[in-house]
Image (cartoon, grey):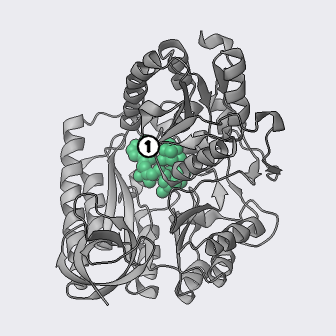
């Protein structure tokens, strides 16, 4: 079955050409206009912020074709799943979900099921989908979202399954329609792809080469968001602070931070910074612009220099500490979080102890911790690994305990303080209970009356927990 289709290829995806990225403009054939009139779509999103933003583009395209969104998958005529391939667990969940959709397809044979995102960049996934999941009509890669109108049209007219996955992509598609899922906070891509090739990671294969958007396009988007009433933007890139390195001028992330700040938008965040690409000009820009929020996510991955080398992270424990200590000193009051992998191939007790020591050194506000997951096609998948899973699980638990300790310790300084919270919405369980985030990205659950999503309200903190704060709105 699968051999009839052009399948993605990780070897091809590994290649990087030196050419500058081309900017292309999105459009679709006028014959597709109104294609979705009277029809409903439902999108399921997995993975990181890049995927969230991609799903907003998918929604924008479907809206432009005349479809309407529904919250009820049983009512849907088109269901799209935007997948993540970063760990095995994420993939298994998706296969389970697709399996469950078979029932809907049986009751509604006209239902179109499309699978997109990072999993579709992997040959094996596409093969499995084609061979075993006959309910799937469309398989599209991360570089092929702009082809959705044509793929849908082709399925309607030919009743044949469609597969479109480019392994390599150097282009930037501008002017794609977007239907944002929130009305007060927005994701803004500033660059796509990743060239770092950490040995455990699938992202450089699934997302293509690093390519930066032009500053004019980014600033235009930010200004439009301000006009639409948005309060917060998060600048996105797999290595957000590598912005501009691929462009043919000296305009970099620090310059962009200054220019985005000058638009006057209330809150600016950015993710994810790579320690290797951080420089003093960025620190200065972050410090000098009051609308850049006092929060930095700086993945360490491991505290062992030996493991960091095997991970191809491009810094040692000492390099990381030197940067971290400088950031801590020059940006007082900022919150710092990180990502940590335990159980990387042949991580010894000694290596793991270095990771625990790193958490003691950095005293993070929070850390996202993962057990290493083997990704086929990445270099680390071939590394010998004798550590039993029980040992890895025990390490994760020990690490999480330490992370929770420092999270709680850092939150204590907010006890009885008044903080500014950008309101995300009303709690589903309790009316008059709202939630939102402080500038330091602390989740606050609070009570109050007459409060709207998107407002920035003052909240007095009455209870401090490890991973959130409770409080009462004050006028
Ligand atoms: N570009 C970002 C994040 C990429 S994925 C960065 O470099 O920080 C988010 C996190 O998932 C990573 O930081 C890493 O901690 C984790 N991760 C990536 N690949 C993994 C794997 N194979 N197994 C376990 N965790 C992984
Ligand atoms: Fe993956 Fe490393 Fe790139 Fe992050 S920097 S996306 S961890 S390869
Ligand atoms: Fe997952 Fe792809 Fe993001 S693998 S973490 S959705 S870049």
User: Looking at the image, is 390 positioned above or below residue 414?
Assistant: above
Q: Is residue 380 left or right of residue 14?
A: left
State whether residue 310 appears in this view. Answer: no
Tell me the quadrant of the picture where the C terminus can be found: bottom left
How crowded pointer 1 is (Cα within 10 Å; few <14, some 14-19, many 20+) is rated as few
Q: Residue at x 38, y 63 (%)?
A: 338
* Ligand 3 within 8 Å, label 1 CB: no
User: Looking at the image, is 396 positioned above or below residue 253?
Assistant: above
Which sits in the foreground, 39 or 249? 39
Which sits in the foreground, 134 or 409? 134
| Coordinates of residue 94 in the picture (x, y in percent) | 42, 32
Question: In the image as oriented, which residue stretches furthest toward the front?
Answer: 38
Q: Is residue 145 left or right of residue 458?
A: right
Secondary structure under the numbered disc 1 in the rendered image: loop
Residue 35: quadrant of the picture: top right
| Coordinates of residue 430 in the picture (x, y in percent) | 22, 63
- Numbered disc total: 1
| Coordinates of residue 97 in the picture (x, y in percent) | 39, 29
| Coordinates of residue 310 in the picture (x, y in percent) | 45, 47
State whether residue 459 appears in this view. Answer: yes
Residue 144: quadrant of the picture: top right
User: Looking at the image, is 455 positioned above or below residue 85?
Assistant: below
Tell me the quadrant of the picture where the N terminus can be found: top right
Residue 11: quadrant of the picture: top right
Q: Is residue 202 left or right of residue 141?
A: left
Which sits in the foreground, 21 or 99? 99
Q: Residue at x 74, y 69 (%)?
A: 215
Q: Residue at x 56, y 23 (%)?
A: 126
Which residue is labeled 1 in the image? 71
Q: Residue at x 35, y 60 (%)?
A: 303
């Amino acid at each position: 079955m699968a051999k009839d289709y052009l399948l993605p290829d990780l070897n091809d995806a590994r290649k990087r050409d030196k050419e500058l990225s081309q900017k292309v403009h999105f459009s679709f054939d006028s014959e597709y206009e109104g294609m979705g009139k009277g029809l409903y779509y439902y999108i399921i999103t997995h993975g990181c912020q890049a995927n969230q933003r991609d799903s907003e583009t998918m929604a924008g395209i479907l809206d432009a074709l005349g479809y309407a969104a529904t919250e009820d998958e049983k009512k849907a005529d088109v269901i799209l799943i935007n997948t993540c391939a970063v760990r095995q667990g994420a993939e298994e969940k998706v296969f389970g979900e697709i399996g469950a959709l078979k029932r809907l397809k049986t009751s509604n044979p006209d239902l179109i099921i499309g699978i997109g995102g990072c999993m579709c960049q992997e040959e094996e996934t596409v093969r499995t989908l084609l061979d075993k999941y006959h309910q799937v009509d469309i398989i599209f890669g991360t570089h092929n979202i702009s082809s959705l109108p044509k793929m849908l049209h082709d399925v309607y007219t030919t009743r044949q399954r469609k597969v479109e996955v480019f392994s390599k992509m150097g282009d930037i598609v501008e002017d794609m329609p977007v239907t944002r899922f929130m009305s007060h906070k927005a994701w803004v891509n500033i660059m796509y792809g990743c060239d770092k090739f950490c040995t455990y990671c699938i992202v450089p294969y699934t997302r293509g080469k690093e390519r930066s958007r032009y500053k004019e396009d980014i600033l235009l988007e930010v200004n439009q968001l301000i006009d639409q009433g948005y309060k917060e933007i998060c600048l996105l890139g797999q290595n957000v602070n590598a912005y501009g390195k691929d462009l043919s001028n000296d305009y970099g992330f620090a310059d962009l931070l200054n220019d985005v700040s000058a638009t006057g938008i209330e809150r600016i965040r950015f993710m994810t910074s790579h320690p290797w690409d951080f420089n003093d000009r960025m620190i200065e820009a972050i410090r000098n612009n009051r609308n850049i929020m006092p929060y930095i996510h700086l993945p360490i991955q491991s505290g062992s220099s030996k493991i960091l080398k095997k991970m191809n992270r491009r810094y040692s424990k000492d390099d990381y500490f030197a940067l971290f200590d400088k950031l801590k000193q020059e940006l007082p009051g900022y919150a710092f979080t990180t990502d940590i992998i335990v159980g990387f191939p042949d991580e010894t007790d000694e290596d793991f102890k270095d990771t625990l020591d790193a958490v003691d050194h950095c005293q993070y506000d929070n850390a996202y911790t993962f057990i290493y997951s083997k990704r086929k096609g990445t270099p680390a998948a071939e590394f010998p690994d004798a550590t039993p899973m029980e040992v890895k699980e025990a390490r994760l638990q020990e690490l999480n305990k330490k992370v929770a300790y420092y999270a709680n310790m850092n939150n204590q300084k907010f006890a009885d303080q008044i903080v500014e919270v950008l309101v995300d919405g009303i709690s589903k369980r309790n009316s008059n209970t709202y939630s939102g985030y402080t500038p330091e990205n602390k989740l606050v659950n609070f009570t109050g009356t007459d409060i709207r999503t998107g407002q920035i309200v003052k909240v007095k903190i009455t209870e401090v927990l490890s991973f959130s704060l409770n409080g009462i709105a004050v006028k």
